[in-house]
Image (tube, rainbow, N blue to C red):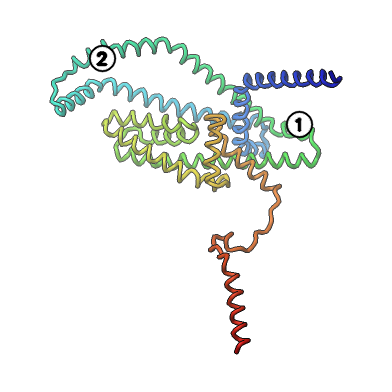
Amino acid sequence: MPGWLPRAMVLALALYACFQVGSWAFDQLLGLLTNVLIAFFLALAIEPAVGRMSARGMRRGLATFLVFLGLLVFGAGFTVLLGSMLAGQIVDMVDDFPQYIDSVINWVNHTFHTELSRVEVQDSLLHSDWLQKYVQNSATGVLDISTTVLGGLFRLLTIFLFSFYFAADGPRLRRALCSVLPPARQTEVLRAWEIAVDKTGGYIYSRGLMALISGVAHYILLEILDVPYAPALAVWVGLVSQFIPTIGTYLAGALPMLIAFTVDPWYALWVLGFVVVYQQFENYVLQPKLTARTVDIHPAVAFGSVIAGTALLGAVGALIAIPAIATLQAFLAAYVKRYDVTDDPRVHGGPRPRRGEPVLSRMRRALGGHGRAEG
């Protein structure tokens, strides 16, 4: 056996063991790393506001606290307003539920020539196996729901804690990062940080603009249908559909449908149809154009980055994909060498020159010269 073979085998086994340990650690810490990534982008989003307040003489810690306090107060007030509105509508629905059942039964009897009554329908529902299984599953799933809610609150607290430290200690974090790099690399890191702040702010601006457009569009529809609490519902649709990725649209449309159902069940179908149509318009027309202008990336790149981010990190990837790609694109654009483009019609979308044209020209010149020689 060669003398180097045992050492190579030991080295290969050690590398394989390190790879397995690293994979295990990455799987265990994936949730924490995702929370840190969300917190970092949240800190970048509030960096302009914190920077302005800090430039006026306020301490960064206090400025960051005031920004988060404003966000918390706005979120809590909005949640309480919608919660009270939803509770009132649920009470009204419960009070009017017998009337809904009567109207549905009358429609069925008139359409299908049946003789159903509310008592028969209620007895069949109360004694059905489906309702009993649903109640049992709901009772056993209360603990799972409580665990999920507590886990979500803990994750939200973790994100806010990390984002607070990232925003409050931003200069210290940049100094610590630059202290281990040579001066040339320090300039590149600071430039990348500045680009990330700018692109993340542009992304938040585009989301806010789309939330405003969505809120106005749904407010007009709800006012036409005379649905109560139209302004609050419009704000709900605009914010939830834009700042909660993937499932935000469905959560945003469910509440207006519920409120519209209390007015007229057909109004709920009108709201559903409008939400579906507007969502397609937003995904394929509005969002790519606004994102391309505010974040300065091509609409196809924006759409593809959202799909790729969703495939990699789910809802989190869909939320941070566009600012991440915009930051990378802007950073590479500053260091990629570019050349002057040749003056070719094909570059500007002109007609493609025919390959046989030079040959025909030479033949014409040759025939013309031969004719002149004979003359």
Q: Badge 1: how crowded within 10 Å, few (<14), some, or many (20+)?
A: few
Quarter of the image where the N terminus is located = top right
* Dot 1: element: helix
Q: Give the residue number, with chain letter if any, for mark 2.
A: 125
Quadrant of image for the C terminus: bottom right
Give the secondary structure at mark 2: helix
Tell me which corner region of the image, top left, top right, bottom left or bottom right, holds residue 60.
Answer: top right
The percent position of residue 348, horizontal first and vertical second, equals: 57, 60
Q: Report, in whole angstroms, how far the alpha carbon at label 1 lies from the one at label 2.
A: 66 Å
For the residue carrying disc 2, how many other residues have a C-alpha within 10 Å: few (<14), some (14-19), or many (20+)?
few
Question: x, y percentage for residue 268?
Answer: 31, 32
Which residue is disc 1 drawn over?
Answer: 176
Give the number of the disc on residue 45.
Answer: none
Amino acid carrying mark 2 in the image: Leu
Looking at the image, residue 332 lies above or below residue 162: below
Seen at 13% across and 20% down, the residue is 115
User: In which quadrant of the rendered view does residue 227 lie?
Assistant: top left
- Callout 1 amino acid: Ala
